[in-house]
Image: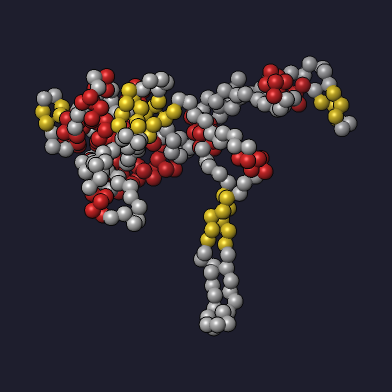
């Protein structure tokens, strides 16, 4: 049975059986919820509950991925330097230090796995024409960087090359390509996968990125393009921008792109952040009909109102 807030109500009957603890008679109503099988197997107090609230799932996900504990330490010295006669003030020097508990220190000393994920997740980068990221060292010559054979190659452009080379790749979208192909960083190519599979996740970009945002929308639908121009090809017509191609496919009609952006963010963002996003869209005058967007997403923006 669940209460009005969705929390479980445990049944602890008074069956007449009692036990004396510190001169106090305790019956079954004082028993802490637990799982007998897990308690005996792992010899620890463990209770399993069905997570039936989106807020609880969101909280657990954020808690698991919150990162390491950290502490900010401040060093300063207000004494006077005898050689120069100037006062030394280092109050603005901050060091971000990390706290390691004994259990974590022992875990790392024995080289145990810190994390494990199965199946693996491949983060898929994408970019507009000639806007791919180029990594180089400070001492590299600018001319040599521009003359590199791989300067125009990226994970995104290599996807076009794989669609030219492999028939199976033409049946997949960009996010589906890791299922049957694996990215070889040394060769900067997509190769057919020999075993297992991976899940593709395209980098998130906000709607204010304009063409980059519309390109991301198209990448979830278009299969097997061999160039960026083919992504803008819809129903036998070549469009000049990714935004126009999205309109032709009905992706951003009636402010649909803003509704989808808020719905997507509601899966991981807090309600406060969602409201802030909606206000930002209002201030920027991005939405042509804000009332339509409000009617579609208001339940997510007011999720914490009753609390």
- Relative image position of residue 68 (x, y in whole percent): 56, 44
User: As drawn, is 224 to the left or to the right of 260?
Assistant: left
Front in this rendered view, residue 216 or 19: 216
- Relative image position of residue 117 (x, y in whole percent): 49, 29
Quadrant of the drawing holding the N terminus? top right
Quarter of the image where one finds residue 159: top left
User: As drawn, is 70 to the left or to the right of 268?
Assistant: right
| Residue visible at 76% across and 26% down in the picture | 30
- Relative image position of residue 62 (x, y in whole percent): 51, 37
Front in this rendered view, residue 190 or 19: 190
| Residue visible at 59% across and 37% down in the picture | 111
Quarter of the image where one finds residue 77: bottom right
The tally of labels here is 0
User: As drawn, is 279 to the left or to the right of 6?
Assistant: left
| Residue visible at 87% across and 32% down in the picture | 22
Front in this rendered view, residue 271 or 147: 147
Quarter of the image where one finds residue 287: top left
- Relative image position of residue 201 (x, y in whole percent): 37, 31
Q: Is residue 91 above or below residue 86?
A: above
Farthest residue to the left: give it: 237
């Amino acid at each position: 049975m669940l209460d009005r807030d969705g929390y479980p109500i445990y049944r602890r009957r008074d069956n007449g059986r009692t036990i004396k603890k510190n001169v106090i008679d305790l019956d079954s109503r004082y028993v802490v919820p637990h799982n007998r099988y897990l308690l005996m197997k792992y010899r620890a107090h463990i209770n399993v509950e069905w997570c039936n609230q989106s807020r609880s799932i969101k909280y657990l996900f954020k808690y698991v991925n919150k990162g390491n504990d950290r502490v900010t330490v401040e060093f300063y010295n207000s004494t006077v330097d005898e050689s120069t006669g100037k006062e030394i003030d280092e109050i603005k020097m901050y060091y971000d230090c990390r706290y390691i508990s004994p259990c974590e220190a022992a875990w790392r000393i024995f080289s145990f796995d810190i994390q494990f994920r199965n199946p693996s997740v491949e983060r898929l980068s994408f970019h507009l024409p000639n806007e791919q990221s180029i990594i180089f060292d400070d001492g590299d010559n600018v001319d040599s960087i521009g003359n590199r054979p791989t300067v125009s190659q990226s994970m995104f452009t290599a996807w076009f090359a794989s669609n030219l080379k492999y028939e199976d790749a033409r049946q997949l979208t960009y996010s589906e390509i890791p299922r049957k192909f694996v990215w070889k960083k040394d060769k900067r190519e997509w190769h057919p996968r020999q075993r297992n599979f991976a899940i593709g996740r395209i980098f998130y970009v906000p709607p204010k990125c304009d063409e980059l945002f519309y390109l991301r929308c198209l990448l979830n639908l278009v299969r097997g393009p061999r160039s960026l121009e083919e992504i803008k090809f819809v129903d036998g017509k070549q469009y000049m921008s990714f935004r126009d191609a999205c309109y032709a496919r009905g992706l951003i009609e009636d402010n649909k792109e803003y509704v989808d952006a808020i719905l997507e963010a509601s899966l991981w963002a807090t309600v406060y952040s969602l409201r802030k996003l909606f206000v930002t869209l209002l201030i920027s005058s991005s939405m042509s009909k804000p009332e339509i967007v409000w009617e579609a997403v208001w339940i997510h923006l007011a999720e914490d109102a009753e609390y």
